[in-house]
Amino acid sequence: MKPTKYAGYSVDEQGNLLGPRKVRKWQPHPSGYLQAMIRVEGRSVNVLAHRIIAEAFVPNPHELPFVNHRDGDKQNNAVGNLEWCDSSANTAHAVATGLIRLGSESKKYRSNHNWRRTERRRAAIKEKFHE
């Protein structure tokens, strides 16, 4: 067990979070990550499993801000599956593993009411130049 930055809480390599009186249970967050509610200075605080485990066990010599799941599985919080990265590396990894889509495949693009017209225009231009 290693202490966390939250007084009275410690975590082990398997991801068990021990509080002042009991082992805390991880619950799924709507985003897909695992979370636990803990008490800090009389207030409830939501902590994410991957961050608290990485802070305790994964070295971060370059003080990178993001924790990446190497296999893309948000619930696989094994120490060997976590790594620190910057924003661009995190985004590139998410695109490479299919966790997010860019361009015409993205939900944001498709939510634009003009996307069909844009796709038709793109197809017409493509057809014109391939004649």
Image: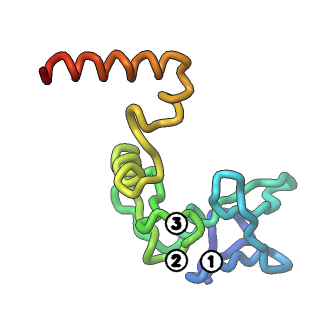
Q: Please provide percent x and percent y for residue 119.
A: 39, 23
User: Measured from the top left, where is residue 28 in percent x and y?
Assistant: 72, 62
Asked if the residue under mark 2 is in contact with the one under mark 1, i.e. CB atoms within 8 Å, the reply is yes
Instruction: State left or right for residue 95 relative to residue 5.
Output: left
From mark 3 to mark 2, how far is it between C-alphas? Answer: 10 Å
| Front disc: 3 or 2 | 3
**Element type where label 2 sits in the image:** loop
Distance of mark 1 from mark 2, alpha carbons? 7 Å
> Which residue occupies 79% across, 62% down?
38
Q: Residue at x 28, y 17 (%)?
A: 124
Answer few, some or many: residues within 10 Å of disc 2's Cα (few below 14, many 20 plus, some between 14 and 19): some
Q: Quadrant of residue 83?
A: bottom left
Q: Are marks 1 and 3 in contact (CB under 8 Å)?
A: no
The residue carrying mark 2 is 78
| Residue visible at 70% across and 62% down in the picture | 35
Image quarter (top left, top right, bottom left or bottom right) of the C terminus: top left
Q: Position of residue 55 (x, y in %)?
A: 52, 65
